[in-house]
Image: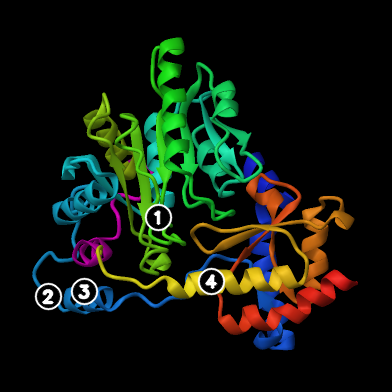
Amino acid sequence: MPIAQYIKETMNSKGASVIRKMFEEGNALKAKYGEDNVFDFSLGNPDLDPPEEVLSAIEEIAKDKSHGAHGYMPNAGYMEARKAMAAKTKKEQGVDVKAENICMTVGAAGALNCVFKAILNAGDNVVVPSPFFAEYRHYVHNQGAELIEVPTKADFSLDTDAIAKALNEKTAAVLINTPNNPTGKIYSEDDIKSLAEVLNAHEKKYGYKPYLISDEPYRAIAYDGREVAPAFPVYDEAVIVTSFAKNISIPGERIGYIAVNPRAKDAAEFIAACIFANRILGFVNAPAFFQKVVAKSWNAKVDYSSYEKRRNEIMAVLDAASIEYAKPEGAFYIFCKVPDKWNGDDMAFSEHLKKFFIISAPGAGFGKKGWIRLAYCVSEKTIVNSKNAFMLAMAE
């Protein structure tokens, strides 16, 4: 039997494979020329070690030999984990959240797929500001729905007027990611309030409020005193999807959760639908072991100053090479404008940088041609030593 047409076409398309392709080519270059001679900024793989509180929780839970410690639990997750995530969400959102408003998931990606399974019918659409995390396209397509891409403003802040024009009777949700991957932009409190006004106005026109889904795995990684604006206080139909991949550096453990605003009209039905989706998508439940770990260590103190230091170092390198960029406000990515002589061809510019052993991710994969993304969660040595390579690449 042949492979499904969508999978076949998407696997072989440039947009779908280029980020992973660049990463794999970077590994090949490292094997051939040595790791110190290759400057791989392709993947956002956090390089801080998990904090001591997390490691202690892992050791403590690993020693538990009690009967049933590794068995099934409710599809929504352990109650102790849901209560802990409710406390975390209350602290971040400033709204009283209960365990009943939480569903534990297989990372933020699992959370998004559960939410979309719960709310999307075939033919519906989800509006997203671009640029955005590339996998969103596939998560929405999984449910036979459409992702409508709406460009942000020149500084990558939300263009709520453009979003308002994109909404229609088939819009089930607006999806935002703050701090943003790939730009590092943090949407301001005014942005979130303006977006809430747009979505409230949608109800007057179409008779319902779309969900506002805020994807927040980078929430804790913010610079220059900035904070991520909460959505719950300004919009009732708000949903948070997030994970512990980036804030405590455990991306491989695949642990996250969904939190629905308790003020949402159908909050109980929404979370019940997400719990059911968690089951029928085949996740069944979030990883049991790490539910227990994050329940004990979710508020571990983490020093992100090294990311901020590396942000400043990569900006200095790009300044020296005369490459324009958007200054990151959070996360650990920097979005760089393709120099004029490449006529906005981000694929060609990435290939050119590769000749100098610089591995980047073309912006086309994120819905923004003419830009490239560099992930600076790499060693300071890699950043500092890349300066000469960038200078040579720009001089040629």
Instruction: Tell me if residue 95 can be seen.
Output: yes
The outermost residue toward the front is 225
* Magenta stretch in the rendered image: 280-297
Crowd tier of the residue under label 2, counting other residues whose Cα lies within 10 Å: few below 14, some 14–19, many 20 or above: few
- Of the numbered discs 2 and 4, the one sitting upstream in the chain is 2
The image quarter in which residue 34 lies: bottom right
Q: How far apart are marks 1 and 3 (CA)?
A: 22 Å
**Nearest to viewer (mark 3 / mark 2):** 3
Q: Is mark 4 on a helix, strand or loop?
A: loop
Crowd tier of the residue under label 1, counting other residues whose Cα lies within 10 Å: few below 14, some 14–19, many 20 or above: many
The label on residue 57 is 3
Q: How far apart are marks 1 and 2 (CA)?
A: 35 Å
Question: Where does the image place residue 281, in percent across and percent down from the top left?
Answer: 38, 43
- Of the numbered discs 1 and 2, the one sitting upstream in the chain is 2
Question: Where does the image place residue 57, in percent across and percent down from the top left?
Answer: 21, 74
Q: How far apart are marks 3 and 2 (CA)?
A: 15 Å
Instruction: Tell me if residue 3 can be seen.
Output: no
Q: What element carries label 3?
A: helix
**Nearest to viewer (mark 2 / mark 4):** 4
